[in-house]
Amino acid sequence: MCARYRMVRNPNPTGDKKKQALHPRVVPYGTLHTDEVIKEAESRSGMSGADIKGALRVLADVMVSRLDQGYNIELDGLGFFSVSLTSRPVMDKKEIRSESIHFKNVNFRCGKYLKSKLKTMHLERIPEGKGVLPPFEERVRRLTEYLHTHHFITCSDYRDLTGCSKYRALEDLNKLINEGKLEKGGYRSTRVYSFPSAKTD
């Protein structure tokens, strides 16, 4: 399977009408979540899915502990992890105390092994222009196929799968909910969609 891409333009930062240069952007098939990754890792090793899941949790706990202490972490084959901080803007360091400085994010820098393996990735361009959006029946078919191998789908995943705009994706998903073919869970930014749960008396 080839990775897919399309050529896109970023908005002009100056706000004028001058077009920006085109650049390639990967169009994901979807997002693989922990269970899917564990299942594939299990098939490639002699470890059980439970062992892999347990190892991932231990690794995450160790990383939290060490990053919290101010260490950077390097994982062979993956890359480097470090913590970034945030505070209100000041002109003099005497204007702020430690209590006003907080965690912002975890930064990731890809390692050499990962980069070298991905340099030979195969790419396939998605056709541009109008008429690219598949009909509703095809979008539903893709969604159904996706949910047979995944527990749920997000709106973003559905957009990547079908090429829909956010408005069209939400319209599709809400239509399927109203028809009883989907149900939603989570809240706002973590909203997910899945097949309806089996009802038991």
Image: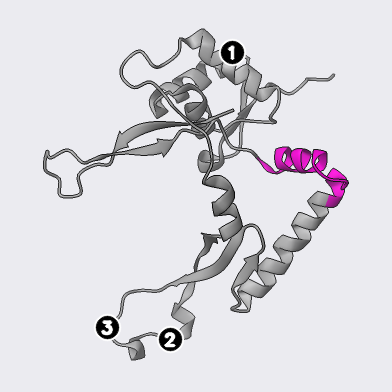
**Residue 173: percent from left, percent from top:** 52, 21
**Residue 138: percent from left, percent from top:** 53, 11
Please state the extent of the stretch shown in magenta in the rendering. Answer: 33-51
- Residue 192 vertical position relative to residue 111 in the rendered view, above or below: above
Residue under label 3: 91
- Residue 76 vertical position relative to residue 186 in the rendered view, above or below: below
Residue type for callout 1: Arg
Q: Quadrant of the N terminus?
A: top right
Residue under label 2: 97
Q: Earlier in the sequence, mark 1 or mark 3?
A: 3
Colour convention: one colour
The image's mark for residue 141 is 1
Q: Residues within 10 Å of mark 1 (few under 14, many from 20)?
A: few
**Alpha-carbon distance for marks 1 and 3?**
57 Å
Q: Residues within 10 Å of mark 3 (few under 14, many from 20)?
A: few
Give the SS element for disc 1. Answer: helix
Residue depicted at x 48% and y 18% = 172
